[in-house]
Image (tube, rainbow, N blue to C red):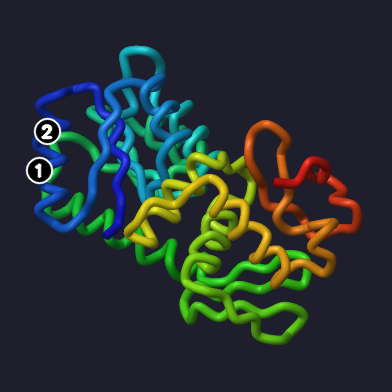
Amino acid sequence: MKRIFLVEDDSAIAKNLSLLLRGEGFAVAHAPSRSEAARCLSEHRFDLALVDISLPDGNGFAVCTEIKERQGIPVIFLTASGDEASVVTGLNMGADDYITKPFRPRELVARIRAALRKRGKDSSSFAVGGLSVDTASGIVKKNGSEVYLSALEYRLLLVFVSSPKSIITRDRLLNELWDAAGEFVTDNALTVYIKRLREKIEDDPAAPRIILTVRGTGYRLGNGLPDGKGAAGRGGEK
């Protein structure tokens, strides 16, 4: 089920949109302000965002930038303003599309599905440090040879691949694995999964270059270069 992040300060619009999208088979999380949006982005993972340009504590342009930096997902602006300047600014900020209020529900759903399809085509493969991941086929290769991962190991790898520029907290990883396994995943179990994944995808698991530890925070995707150049340090692995 695709997860939609709705950033909209009008409670009536938010309620109606949430009902519409859930009826179309989407899961929906709502944030009424920029500050609440930032909190949600740090705690949850989404597939697409609908962002109102006018917010009580800022504007949707700033929220769009945060979404792109943290999760890299498609952003569709919802705006009551059809002026060219707002549209151009939004697209220049990295938005994938925009729709002007009032809009037709079917048109919005069609725009959402189109953005999700485009993203799927654009992000079907990823490569770093001799490791390649084809999310369309589910095949993972290391230096040209296929690597066989368990379902949870693959899900764990996808979390990093889907957020290549973000620090991934242990809490977020626990939530992702819990969703995948359908059962509670302990902190100690997460450490084991990280260790097993590194053993399969790293040239030297004791000195990882792909999945790096960020002390006191969690992990991040490295660039595969020797000694973790340009990425976080390696010490204090957990």
Left or right: where 26 falls relative to 52: left
Residue appearing at x 79%, y 45% in the figure:
231
Residue appearing at x 40%, y 16% in the figure:
58
The correct choice, above or below, for 8 with respect to 108 in the image is above
Residue appearing at x 14%, y 57% in the figure:
24
Query: Which residue, given by chain and number where applicable, does mark 1 sit on?
Result: 19
Which residue is at the front of the view, 30 or 175?
175
Which residue is at the front of the view, 26 or 123?
26
The correct choice, above or below, for 220 with respect to 162 in the image is above
- Between the residue at mark 2 and the residue at mark 1, the CA separation in whole angstroms equals 6 Å
The amino acid type found where label 2 is placed reads Lys
The correct choice, above or below, for 132 with respect to 97 in the image is below
Image x and y of residue 130, in percent: 77, 72
In which quadrant of the rendered image does the N terminus lie?
A: bottom left
The amino acid type found where label 1 is placed reads Leu
State the SS at label 2.
Answer: helix
Residue extending farthest to the bottom is 145
Which residue is at the front of the view, 115 or 209?
209
Residue extending farthest to the right is 226
Left or right: where 88 falls relative to 194: left
Query: Which residue, given by chain and number where applicable, does mark 2 sit on?
Result: 15
Image x and y of residue 133, in percent: 60, 72
Please say if the residues under marks 2 and 1 sit with CB atoms less than 8 Å apart.
Answer: yes
